[in-house]
Every structure is written in structure tokens, then in C-alpha cells.
Image (cartoon, rainbow, N blue to C red):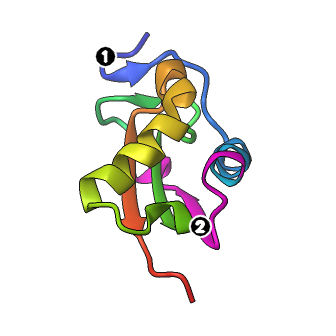
């Protein structure tokens, strides 16, 4: 293994989208794989994808919850991917239309 490069299997955008749709019933959802921009950084993998993601999401399940609680819902929904090697999430909570 190259120093600073993860050997974990990459996570795919579609898998994250499916999991979030099933768990959080989002009204808006965008999942961006930003892994290529982190090549050579801690947690990156040799494939260049599947380790660093940006998630923009709106969900009725966020209503009345703090920012921290909303982020916790997203992290909890994706815990299995984190366990598999998803290294970084940038979460943007957006308002429903």
C-alpha cells in the first residue's frame, strides 16, 4: 500500500444515493464524488474515487432538528459505508422547495 492511500474498496455515488433515499426520504438530494481532488491525501485510494463525498440534502426528517442532529442523521444513515472506507463527508443541508 502507498503511504496515505487507503486499501478499502471505493464507495459509489449510486450506493450512497440509494441508502440516503431509503433512510431519510429526501426531497432534494445531490451526491458528488470529490475524491479525485483529494488524490494523495489521507484516506484517498488508488482508484481515485469513492472516498470523499459532498452531500446536498433536504429531508422532512430534519424538521425541528439542530444542525448537529441533521448531520448525525446523515452519518448514521451512511455508517456502513464509513466502516467500508468512506473517508470524508461534506454535508450541506438545504431547504426543501
SS at mark 2?
strand
Q: CA distance from mark 1 to mark 2?
A: 31 Å
Q: Say which residue label 1 marks.
A: 3
Q: Label for residue 30? A: 2
Which image quarter: residue 40?
Answer: top left
Could you tell me residue 16's position as x and y percent?
A: 64, 45
Q: Is residue 92 left or right of residue 8?
A: left
Vertical placement of residue 41 versus 30, above or below:
above
Between residue 37 and residue 18, name the one nearer to us.
Answer: 18
Q: Quadrant of the N terminus?
A: top left
Query: Residue at horizontal 27%, vertical 61%?
Result: 67
Query: Residue at horizontal 50%, vertical 15%?
Result: 7
Q: Tell me where the magenta segment starts and ends, as one range.
A: 22-38
Could you tell me residue 78's position as x and y percent?
A: 53, 37
Between residue 2 and residue 92, name the one nearer to us.
Answer: 92
SS at mark 1?
loop
Between residue 84 and residue 37, name the one nearer to us.
Answer: 84
Residue 91 appears in the rendering: yes
Q: Quadrant of the C terminus?
A: bottom right
Query: Residue at horizontal 63%, vertical 65%?
Result: 26
Vertical placement of residue 23 versus 51, above or below:
below
Q: Check if residue 25 falls in the magenta segment.
A: yes
Could you tell me residue 65's position as x and y percent?
A: 33, 61
Could you tell me residue 18's position as x and y percent?
A: 73, 48
Query: Residue at horizontal 60%, vertical 53%?
Result: 24
Amino acid at each position: 500500500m502507498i503511504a496515505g492511500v487507503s486499501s478499502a474498496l471505493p464507495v459509489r455515488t449510486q450506493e450512497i444515493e440509494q441508502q440516503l433515499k431509503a433512510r431519510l426520504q429526501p426531497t432534494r438530494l445531490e451526491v458528488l464524488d470529490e475524491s479525485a481532488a483529494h488524490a494523495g491525501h489521507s484516506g484517498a485510494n488508488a482508484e481515485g474515487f469513492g472516498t470523499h463525498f459532498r452531500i446536498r440534502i433536504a429531508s422532512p426528517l430534519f424538521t425541528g432538528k439542530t444542525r448537529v442532529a441533521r448531520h448525525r442523521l446523515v452519518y448514521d444513515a451512511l455508517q456502513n459505508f464509513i466502516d467500508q472506507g468512506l473517508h470524508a463527508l461534506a454535508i450541506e443541508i438545504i431547504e426543501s422547495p
